[in-house]
Amino acid sequence: MTNYDVLAEKVLAGHILTDEEALSILDSPDDDLLALLHGAYKVRKYYYGNKVKLNMIMNTKSGLCPENCGYCAQSIVSKAPIEKYSMMKREEIIAGAARAAELNAGTFCIVASGRGPANRELEIVIDSVKEIKSKHEHMTVCACLGLLKSDQAKRLKEAGVDRYNHNINTSEAHHETITTSHTYGDRVNTVNLAKDAGISPCSGVIIGMRETKEDVIAMARSLHVMDADSIPVNFLHAVDGTPLGGTDELNPRYCLKVLCLFRFMNPTKEIRISGGREVNLRSLQPFGLYPANSIFIGDYLTTEGQESNRDRQMLEDLGFEIDLEPLIKEPVTV
């Protein structure tokens, strides 16, 4: 059995996980799960204490996407019966931010389907963000609009966008089995353009898309190399009508091991339990917050989330507190 307390101390001292150490986490027997969680929590507590960041997502444009991502109900290859609509009005987006503020969500994420933002869509987002920032100056505003161009990234920064999300989703080796309408490099390039514009980079993954454990390790390591500030870890909520519909590879214990891996591999970063946590972690959801320090509240893009009052009860039962700070720079405890 790996001594995860010792591994935590090594990571806190600057050690970068080897592939062998990473695989030992994913392959660890279920009997070791509590010890693994304790080790990951030791790292999480050092940087974030018992604080949890709340994020709220708003799907401002649904469906109508020309990309062929196999997991997505909004893609051109999906036959899933979802609501489809063009870009929301500025007033609707601003109202969404107000709702996020009411729920103490420190981050409000504006998401729009599509390959990348059209000029009209970008203008709506820019105008909305300026108004949101004038009303909620301490709120972190994240945008997720697809592939970006350099000038678009700069304009979003000037408008007040704090963070840009564009997930790598899977490993470079597995990418073409998930989508062929854009490359893995396209995704990495967008994250780098956001960084170059001075926007905090957010990039994460979807676990459970028929990838290998080696793919999962490659994802965690790629995000370490990319230096993503915020890492959403999604667990596939397979939607009927998508190419990955019916896929059911995950169990709650493995999901917890994945979260621990991402904490050990990216010790200083915001690790967010994201889409699919309710259907994959199920009754073990609270344990996920020992390695992770962030969750989405409310619904996701095309699937429902857990009721916000249940999330709040979960945090209260854990003895954790809501973190309203935009970013944590220094360790909270030693």
Image (tube, grey):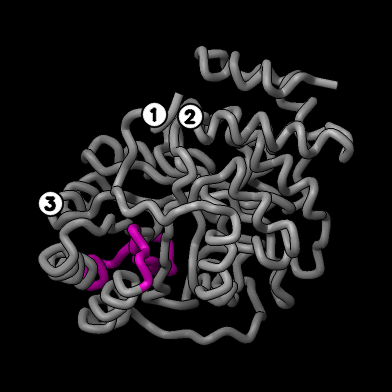
Residue at 76% across / 69% down in the picture?
A: 245
Residue 109 seen in the figure: no
Of badges 1 and 3, the one in the foreground is: 1
Write the residue at 22% across / 40% down. 197
Is label 3 in contact with label 2 (beta carbons under 8 Å)?
Answer: no
| CA separation in Å, label 1 and label 2 | 6 Å
Q: Position of residue 35 (x, y in %)?
A: 76, 32
Q: CA distance from mark 1 to mark 3?
A: 30 Å
Look at 63% across and 86% down and name the residue there.
81
Q: Secondary structure at mark 3?
A: helix
In the rendered image, which quarter contains the N terminus? top right
Disc sitting over residue 50 in the figure: none
According to the picture, the residue beneath numbered tag 3 turns out to be: 158
Q: Where, quadrant-wise, is the C terminus in this rendering?
A: top left
Badge 2 amino acid = Tyr
Q: Which residue is mark 1?
A: 331
Can you tell which quarter of the image residue 9 is in?
Answer: top right
Residue 260, x across and y down, in percent: 66, 37
Q: Can residue 21 be seen from the camera position used here?
A: yes
Q: Which range of residues does the magenta coloring cover?
A: 103-122
Q: Mark 1–mark 2 contact, CB under 8 Å? A: yes
In the rendered image, residue 89, in percent from the top left (x then y), is placed at 25, 83
Q: Earlier in the sequence, mark 1 or mark 3?
A: 3
- Residue 167 is left or right of residue 205, and the answer is left
Query: What's the residue at 45%, 36% (across, down)?
Result: 269
Q: Position of residue 63 (x, y in %)?
A: 49, 77
Amino acid carrying label 1: it is: Pro
Quickly name the residue at label 2: 46
Q: Earlier in the sequence, mark 1 or mark 2?
A: 2
Regarding mark 1 in the picture, which secondary structure is present there? loop
